[in-house]
Image (cartoon, rainbow, N blue to C red):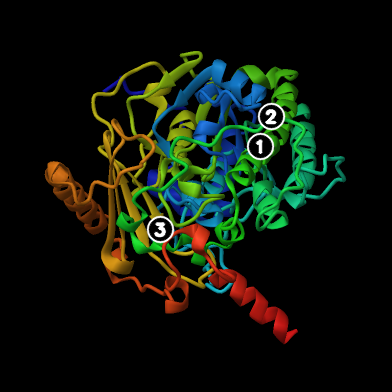
């Protein structure tokens, strides 16, 4: 392991500090303020976090995508380090955000869906959040843009999004996702340019490329009238699903619980290429706003003492396995995300770190480590600071995990993923479905190895590893309830064979009838 870093002093015990951080105790905050106001050690950095929604790692130029239009993200990566094996802990917006703002898994936060027909509890006041920890530690904490947090933004001053009008090509319809991001960036720019008496933790949470979800709805079914003003990207090598009959039931009938995939079920190959072109377009809109924010930071004296962190809450199907958007599956496109650190304290420049398995659970302990703030006990993530400082820790996590419950509650198909250095193993309760992929030899996850005798040992090991993890983290996975009405498991296999509305769409239609 690397040498232990010297942390700036805070005159509170760990227990006293974290007790206050749960709800930003006035007593704790005032003690810190009295001891620290006007005398911040130079090693306490500012932190700027930039988040996109639904950005797959493989869609970023810095990670090798030649179709990407991400010059500003790429420039940030060139100034710092980017992690290759980086994963979300849930491929869905609200659960992922509640997870990375607390450093907890979704079964620990209780935030395991986007709500709607499936009530989501607000985080308990006693659960420390990143914003609360930094606010109690004397930081100015402010959040701009998309929230969707279920209480996990506690401790941040929140600036809500507003929409601005945009001119756009007919091939790229815009909704609130695209219309809110310029306002989010503008407010973040204003904040960065103002004087700061204390170190700050600022978050710019952008919506795009999430606008792609609205694009799917606007182009449901086969369409021939779209004429994008760009060349169409090719389909990925893993576009087709040759062994769908060998996939778990929730994957076989993904179109029935995933309304976007139901809307795309009749698409032809050209329509999927339209989808990819639109996805890259909405990503380019986000990248432009990221450029505005980074330019503003660079124009201030605070830039030299600011750590910049960039990531996405989850990925996107990007036409792999004929998938659009996200949900239910744990394939690389939906779970593997960009994770970039640059600026203050980052020793390497332009480095792709491939060795460790990391996840968004590592965000909170890493930032607390940088700021010299206590880390809550019982977290599953680890500080990445040694890697950012150019060290190579001898010991790192053996695996990362991701979890799934439901989007809105109309179907519930609990699933778990274990990703080790070479393999990915997934387990679904419905139908006792399993997947095992050798990512060294099959990075596109084309062949499920569950029934391959040559991989029997690897399968046995990963089953045991998941069971051990479930027991260690008190995950109630094996006792969860499956909700999958037979109506959504009745058509012939293949998303292209989907008929009628998906379960969420049917629920919407039923509500509309009653109005």
Q: Quadrant of the C terminus?
A: bottom right
| Mark closer to the observer (2, 3) | 2
Which residue carries the number 1 mark? 277
Locate residue 82, reporting x and y percent: 48, 25
Tell me if 103 is positioned left or right of 65 in this view.
Answer: left
Q: CA distance from mark 3 to mark 1?
A: 25 Å
Q: Identify the element where label 3 is drawn.
A: helix
Q: Identify the element where label 1 is drawn.
A: helix
| Mark closer to the observer (1, 2) | 2
In the foreground, 281 or 191 = 281
First in sequence: mark 1 vs mark 2: 2
Query: Residue at coordinates 66% horizontally, 53% vertically from top-left?
Result: 216
Query: Residue at coordinates 75% horizontally, 18% vertically from top-left?
Result: 299
Locate residue 281, reporting x and y percent: 70, 36
Q: Quadrant of residue 512?
A: bottom right
Q: Is residue 125 visible?
A: no
Which residue carries the number 2 mark? 231
Q: CA distance from mark 2 to mark 3?
A: 31 Å
Q: How many marks?
A: 3
Say whether marks 1 and 2 touch (CB < 8 Å): yes
Say whether marks 3 and 1 touch (CB < 8 Å): no
Q: Residue furthest bottom?
A: 514
Q: CA distance from mark 1 to mark 2?
A: 8 Å
In the foreground, 416 or 109 = 416
Locate residue 427, reporting x and y percent: 30, 57
Q: Quadrant of the N terminus?
A: top left
Tell me if 138 is positioned left or right of 143 in this view.
Answer: left
Which residue carries the number 3 mark? 251
First in sequence: mark 3 vs mark 1: 3
């Amino acid at each position: 392991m690397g040498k232990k870093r010297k942390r700036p002093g805070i005159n509170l015990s760990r227990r006293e500090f974290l007790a206050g951080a749960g709800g930003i105790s006035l007593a704790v905050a005032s003690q810190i303020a009295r001891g620290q106001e006007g005398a911040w050690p130079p090693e306490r950095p500012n932190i700027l976090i930039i988040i996109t929604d639904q950005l797959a790692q493989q869609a970023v130029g810095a990670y090798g995508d030649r179709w990407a239009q991400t010059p500003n993200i790429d420039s940030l990566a060139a100034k710092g380090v980017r992690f290759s094996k980086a994963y979300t802990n849930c491929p869905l917006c609200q659960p992922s955000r509640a997870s990375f703002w607390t450093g907890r898994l979704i079964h620990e936060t209780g935030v395991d869906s986007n709500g709607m027909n499936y009530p989501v509890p607000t985080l308990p006041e006693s659960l420390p959040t990143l914003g609360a920890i930094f606010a109690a530690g004397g930081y100015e904490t402010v959040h701009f843009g998309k929230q969707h947090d279920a209480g996990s933004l506690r401790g941040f001053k929140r600036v809500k999004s507003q929409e601005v009008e945009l001119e756009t090509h007919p091939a790229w319809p815009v909704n609130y996702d695209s219309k809110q991001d310029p306002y989010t960036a503008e407010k973040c720019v204003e904040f960065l340019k103002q004087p700061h008496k204390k170190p700050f933790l600022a978050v710019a949470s952008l919506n795009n490329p999430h606008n792609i979800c609205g694009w799917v709805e606007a182009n449901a079914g086969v369409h021939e009238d779209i004429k994008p003003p760009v060349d169409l990207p090719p389909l990925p090598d893993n576009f087709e699903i040759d062994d769908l009959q060998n996939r778990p039931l929730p994957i076989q009938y993904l179109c029935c619980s995933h309304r976007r995939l139901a809307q795309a079920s009749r698409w032809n190959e050209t329509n999927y290429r339209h989808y990819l072109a639109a996805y890259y377009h909405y990503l380019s809109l986000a990248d432009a706003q990221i450029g505005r924010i980074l330019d503003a930071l660079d124009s201030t004296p605070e830039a030299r003492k600011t750590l910049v962190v960039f990531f996405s809450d989850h990925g996107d199907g990007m036409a792999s396995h004929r998938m659009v958007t996200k949900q239910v599956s744990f394939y690389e496109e939906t779970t593997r995300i960009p994770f970039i650190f640059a600026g203050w304290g980052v020793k390497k420049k332009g480095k792709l770190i491939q060795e460790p398995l990391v996840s968004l659970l590592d965000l909170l302990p890493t930032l607390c480590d940088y700021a010299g703030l206590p880390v809550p006990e019982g977290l599953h993530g680890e500080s990445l600071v040694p890697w950012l400082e150019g060290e190579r820790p001898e010991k790192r996590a053996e695996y990362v995990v991701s979890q799934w419950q439901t989007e809105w509650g109309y179907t519930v198909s609990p699933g778990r993923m274990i990703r080790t250095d070479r393999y990915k193993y997934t387990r679904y309760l419905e139908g006792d479905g399993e997947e095992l992929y050798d990512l060294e030899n099959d990075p596109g996850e084309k062949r499920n190895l569950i029934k391959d005798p040559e991989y029997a040992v690897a399968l046995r090991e990963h089953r045991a590893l998941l069971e051990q993890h479930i027991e260690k983290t008190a995950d109630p996975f094996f006792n969860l309830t499956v909700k999958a009405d037979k109506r959504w498991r009745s058509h012939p296999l293949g998303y292209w064979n989907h008929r009628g509305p998906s379960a969420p769409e049917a629920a919407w239609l039923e509500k509309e009838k009653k109005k």
